[in-house]
């Protein structure tokens, strides 16, 4: 079986991260993910697809990748060596740490090992609503 490796990075500062709604539970954001494309055969060519997943448990993400939350609509892979960026739409709970990883799939259906695990905590910076009926 061929082994494909991919490094996944989440920038420390999230450019255009999207504004969270007023509820810290179930907030929809678009964090940019960055990585370098790998090939169809190791580092040669172009892979067929990506499968991105996220979890609040890094060990489960690595050891049970298929059970983690699937992030839909990944981009089409670019030629090996190309820098890639994608801002998926995900729902998170503010103040919780999430881990992201990706598996690369080639035209024969071969799957890479799980990428490195990228970690990000989305701060709960949503202020409470003001009191409007103080008497």
Image (spheres, rainbow, N blue to C red):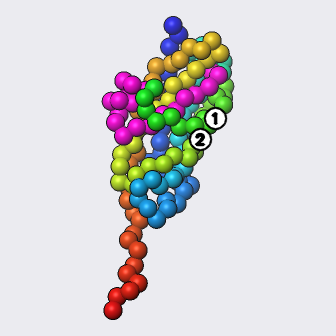
List the residue tagged with mark 1.
75
Q: Residue at x 66, y 31 (%)?
A: 76
User: How many residues crowd mark 2 within 10 Å: few (<14), some (14–19), many (20+)?
Assistant: few
User: How many residues crowd mark 1 within 10 Å: few (<14), some (14–19), many (20+)?
Assistant: some
Residue 22, compared with residue 100, is above or below; it is: below
Q: Give the mark nearer the N terminus: 1 vs 2.
A: 1
Q: Residue at x 62, y 25 (%)?
A: 49
- Count of labels in the image: 2
Residue 45 falls left or right of residue 124: right
- Say which element carries label 2: strand
Q: Residue at x 63, y 12 (%)?
A: 108
Can residue 86 be seen at all in this image of the molecule? yes
Residue 112's label in the rendered image is none
Indicate the quadrant where residue 119 lies.
top left
Can residue 8 be seen at all in this image of the molecule? no
Whether the magenta-drawn stretch holds residue 38 is answered as no
Q: Residue furthest top?
A: 1
Residues in magenta, as a range? 47-65
Point out the image quarter for the C terminus.
bottom left
Residue 69 falls left or right of residue 75: left
The image position of residue 10, as x and y in percent, is 47, 42
Residue 86's label in the rendered image is 2
Q: Pointer 1 and pointer 2: residues touching (CB < 8 Å)?
A: yes
């Amino acid at each position: 079986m061929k082994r494909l490796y991919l490094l996944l990075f989440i920038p420390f500062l999230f450019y255009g991260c999207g504004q969270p709604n007023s509820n810290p539970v179930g907030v929809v954001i678009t964090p940019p993910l960055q990585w370098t494309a790998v090939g169809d055969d190791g580092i040669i060519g172009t892979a067929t697809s990506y499968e991105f997943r996220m979890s609040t448990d890094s060990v489960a993400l690595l050891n049970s990748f298929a059970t983690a939350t699937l992030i839909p609509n990944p981009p089409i892979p670019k030629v090996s060596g190309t820098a890639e960026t994608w801002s998926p739409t995900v729902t998170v709970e503010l103040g919780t740490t999430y881990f992201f990883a990706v598996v690369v799939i080639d035209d024969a259906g071969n799957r890479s090992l799980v990428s490195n695990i990228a970690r990000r905590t989305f701060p709960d910076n949503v202020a409470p609503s003001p009191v409007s009926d103080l008497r």
